Amino acid sequence: MSNGGGAGGNRDRGSSNGEGGGSGGVNGGNGLDIDGLIDDPATRIIVCCGSGGVGKTTTAAAIGLRAAERGRRTVVLTIDPARRLAQSMGLTELDNTPRPVKGAAGPDGPGELHAMMLDMKRTFDEVVLAHADPERARAILENPFYQSLSAGFAGTQEYMAMEKLGQLQATGEWDLIVVDTPPSRSALDFLDAPGRLGSFLDGKIIRVLMTPAKVGGRSAMKFLNVGMGLLTGTLGKIFGAQLLTDLQTFVAAMDSMFGGFRERAEGTYQLLKAQGTAFLVVAAPERDALREAAYFVDRLAADQMPLAGLVLNRVHGTGAPQLTAERAQAAAQALEESSAENGGDHGAGNGAGNGEQHGTAEGAGSGAEREARQGAAEALAAGLLRLHAERVEVMGREQRTRDRFVSVYPDVPLVEVPALAGDVHDLDGLRLIGRQLAGGSDR
């Protein structure tokens, strides 16, 4: 995978009926070079985005682990409130501080892996404490409006994600930061954070409420009471007098920090657009998931963000690609018909034999057991053939869905990761995913 999409030929694909070979970590002519990306010292940030339920958190963790074991000091930041990342890394909890992951260091290199989960309110508190004097910081932290804003005001999470990413990058402590975004289209809302913040700060209400703090003293109160009495009276009726007072106090205390908020958000936004950042879109080979992936690809292109490629996760494969669904179904039906016929013949033969001659009980029992075993084997074989046919049909649907996406986005590099038998819940599982992301390479 390269930092930014590159053109290239699509890999040869099996026919749409699923006769092609099984998928698994497939890198085609326009495939992703995951190891090349994470080994490049110029790559400093990887952002994994995608809809929910496609394995995005697992992908981010696997990339972080593989990067650490290849010698890079890596931190994985999740904005997803789910706890799967902590569980898969053997951590009891994740919080706003990077936690070291034991057993994730490279055997010979200096690599390390840390993980953390965004704590929106704590990040906001840290910003206030870092950019305001102690007295003003205390006034802000104790303000009821601030407490509501920092705990869950619309858009605050996305802005604080920008703040935390900027903080991590500014320390210079990390070779690579892997960001796991929320499981929905809002995963890219943090790209809008600088603009939304600017709209908030430039809004008429905020400018009115900031005016007393800027003018100061008795003239400010006169201006507010006389010049804007009608507006504040209306706001007081809508929000309540106490809330309006809290809001005015909050704006006055935050006034000196607003410019810094906007500047840092814009700086992080430019960081995301810069060389050294790579966006990975994660999807499943399903129509709805790839429709969401198309949205992410288009949005990233519109914002001129560096798209590295698409991870197509949980792709089904088979160990017998030459056996089509039709042939498997026909073979299963033949076995079932043969078993039914043989069962009837054996029953008639046994009845005639028992009426004409007496065999030993041991011989009769032995023959019945053989027939039972043969019938069970045929039933099992027929069942496996039908399961194979179903799998091949699923593969065909996935292949057609994938092909439609590739036909629209032929220049987006792509890697396929096979579906696993169970969930990933430990470092060994993450290592396996990492190898599949790298095309099955153990190096």
Image (cartoon, rainbow, N blue to C red):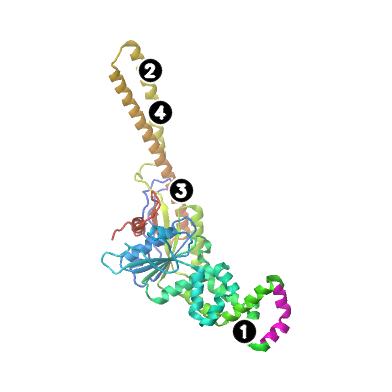
Give neighbour class at mark 2: few <14, some 14-19, many 20+ (Cα, 10 Å).
few
Q: Amino acid at mark 2?
A: Ala
For image coordinates 49% across by 58% down, the residue present is 51
Q: Quadrant of residue 227?
A: bottom right
Question: Could you tell me if residue 274 is visible in this image?
Answer: no
Nearest to the observer: residue 404 or residue 102: 102
Secondary structure beneath dot 4 equals: helix
Q: Depth check: 127 or 430 in front?
A: 127
Residue 337: mark in rendering: 4
How far from the left and from the top, in percent, is residue 63? 37, 62
* Amino acid type indicated by mark 4: Glu
Q: Nearer the viewer, mark 1 or mark 3?
A: 1
SS for dot 3: helix
Look at mark 2 in the image and give the residue it sits on. Answer: 348
Spatial CA span between label 3 and label 4: 29 Å
Camera-side residue: 148 or 269? 148
Q: CA distance from mark 1 to mark 4?
A: 88 Å
